[in-house]
Image: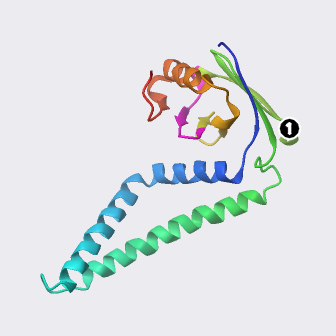
Amino acid sequence: MNTVEATYQITLSDFRKATYYGLSLRHQRSLGIMFLVLLISLFYTIAAFLGLWKLYMLIPFVAVAYLIWGLILFAGAERGIKKYLKYPNCIIGKNHKTTLDAKHVHIQIPECKVNTSYPISKLACVFELSTLFLIYISIQDLYILPKRALEDGESDFLRENFRTQLGTRFYTRYDSK
């Protein structure tokens, strides 16, 4: 299997997954602290109501502040998605044709007049999620390749090819088989 061809359309769900994955990467430490504070605050408040110790309101207030920050963060992501949907060159719902061989990735989106080819070794990075490959041409240019557009075995081929070509710039949770 030397060449993988995929024809597909990006759905809002695909775009939302990519957006939230990027958000979680950018704010990984902050989100981890937020969840830890919320968990500690929950146990602290429950224990205080059970009479184990006196309830000091500072801890629940800090938890509420973190919760509000998290809601604002995710609301901003949703606002960005809605704003992107109004963008004239929005790729959601447009036909994509992606061809990947051992050395190159070729992406066509005729409705947006996109016809590009890049050497795989020059890609910024590639992330493999459970349902998507996120192909970063540069830090700002992202192309989404849904796994539903691939045939049996093509995901494994792409995983191994990206791992070989990109090394540490390929991120996956799946081990090679």
Using the rendered view, name the quadrant where residue 158 is placed. Answer: top right
Q: Does the magenta stretch include residue 126?
A: yes
97 to 11, vertically: above or below: above
Q: Point out residue 109 in the picture as x, y percentages from the top left corner.
A: 81, 37
- In front here: 49 or 134? 49
Residue displayed at 46% across by 23% down? 167
Q: In the picture, which quadrant includes the C terminus?
A: top left
The residue singled out by tag 1 in the image is: 113
Magenta stretch in the rendered image: 121-132
- Counting from the top left corner in percent of width and height, residue 106 is at 73, 25
Residue 75: x and y in percent read: 57, 68
Q: Count the marks: how many?
A: 1
Image quarter of the N terminus:
top right
Work out whether residue 70 or residue 152 is closer to the camera in this orientation and state it: 152
| Residue drawn at the location 46% of the way across and 68% of the way down | 70
The residue positioned 76% from the left and 29% from the top of the image is 116
140 vs 32, left or right, is right
Q: Residue furthest left?
A: 52
Residue 104: image quadrant is top right
Please indicate whether residue 46 sits to the left or right of residue 122 in the image.
Answer: left
Q: Does the magenta stretch include residue 129?
A: yes
- Tell whether 132 sits left or right of 6: left
* Residue farthest toward the top in the current orientation of the protein: 2
Binning the other alpha carbons within 10 Å of mark 1 as few (below 14), some (14 to 19) or many (20 upward) gives few
Amino acid type of disc 1?
A: Lys
Which color scheme does this rendered protein use? Answer: rainbow
Secondary structure type for disc 1: loop
Q: Which residue is drawn at 36% across and 54% down?
A: 29
Placement of 158 over or under 28, stated as above or below: above
The answer to whether residue 112 is seen in the rendering is yes
Residue 41 position (above or below residue 14): below
* Residue 146, visible in the rendered structure: no
